[in-house]
């Protein structure tokens, strides 16, 4: 799956941002958002980070997937981030809901085995591979 020309995996460093990047404040921290990618200020530039839950934007990239959460809720998925749209057209970053199925995962996933089950862990989210090269968000309790 191709995320687009400006998409970068988490941890990627850039020295400058495009003029299309907007500033988004979440919980007293500032992030920059540009075409589905979230950045945090870093020494001499910006680092791609996981989208902050609660962050809001007015547009999503054109290849964003619509995903079914339950009978009454559809969310949007792009580059490992889930969004919920309100009636004013604002997209808010939300945590992934167990059972949600996505068609692709971003780069940087790590294959892990818990018990006898294999998962792909992207950030703090576990995805269970299912039929047809799809992945289901799984609720996993790790042994502490």
Image: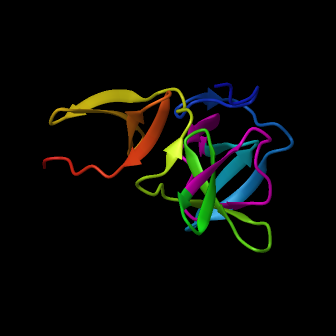
Q: Is residue 7 visible?
A: yes
Q: Extreme bottom residue here? A: 87
Q: Quadrant of the N terminus?
A: top right
- Number of numbered labels in the structure image: 0
- Image quadrant of residue 35? top right
* x and y percentages locating residue 96 in the rendered image: 48, 54
Q: Nearer the viewer, residue 115 or 88?
A: 115
Q: Extreme right residue here? A: 19
Q: Magenta residues, as a range?
A: 41-68
Tell whether 53 sits left or right of 91. Answer: left
Q: Nearer the viewer, residue 53 or 120?
A: 120
Q: Relative to 108, is 78 above or below?
A: below
* x and y percentages locating residue 118 in the rendered image: 28, 31
Q: Nearer the viewer, residue 82 or 37?
A: 82
* x and y percentages locating residue 15 in the rendered image: 69, 30
Q: Relative to 136, is 70 above or below?
A: below
Q: Is residue 55 visible?
A: no
* x and y percentages locating residue 8 in the rendered image: 63, 29
21 in the magenta segment: no
At 79% from the left and 60% from the top, the residue drawn is 58
Tell whether 99 sits left or right of 35. Answer: left
At 74% from the left and 30% from the top, the residue drawn is 6
- Image quadrant of residue 38? top right
- Image quadrant of residue 44? top right
């Amino acid at each position: 799956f191709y995320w687009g020309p400006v998409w970068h995996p988490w941890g990627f460093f850039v020295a400058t941002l495009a003029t299309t990047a907007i500033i988004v404040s979440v919980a007293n921290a500032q992030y920059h958002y540009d075409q589905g990618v979230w950045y945090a200020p870093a020494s001499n530039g910006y680092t791609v980070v996981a989208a902050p839950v609660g962050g809001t934007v007015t547009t999503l990239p054109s290849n964003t997937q619509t995903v079914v959460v339950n009978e009454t809720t559809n969310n949007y998925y792009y580059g490992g981030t889930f969004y919920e749209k309100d009636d004013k057209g604002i997209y808010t970053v939300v945590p992934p809901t167990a059972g949600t199925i996505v068609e692709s995962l971003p780069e940087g996933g790590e294959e892990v085995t818990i018990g006898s089950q294999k998962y792909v862990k992207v950030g703090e989210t576990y995805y269970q591979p299912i039929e047809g090269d799809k992945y289901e968000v799984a609720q996993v309790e790790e042994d502490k």
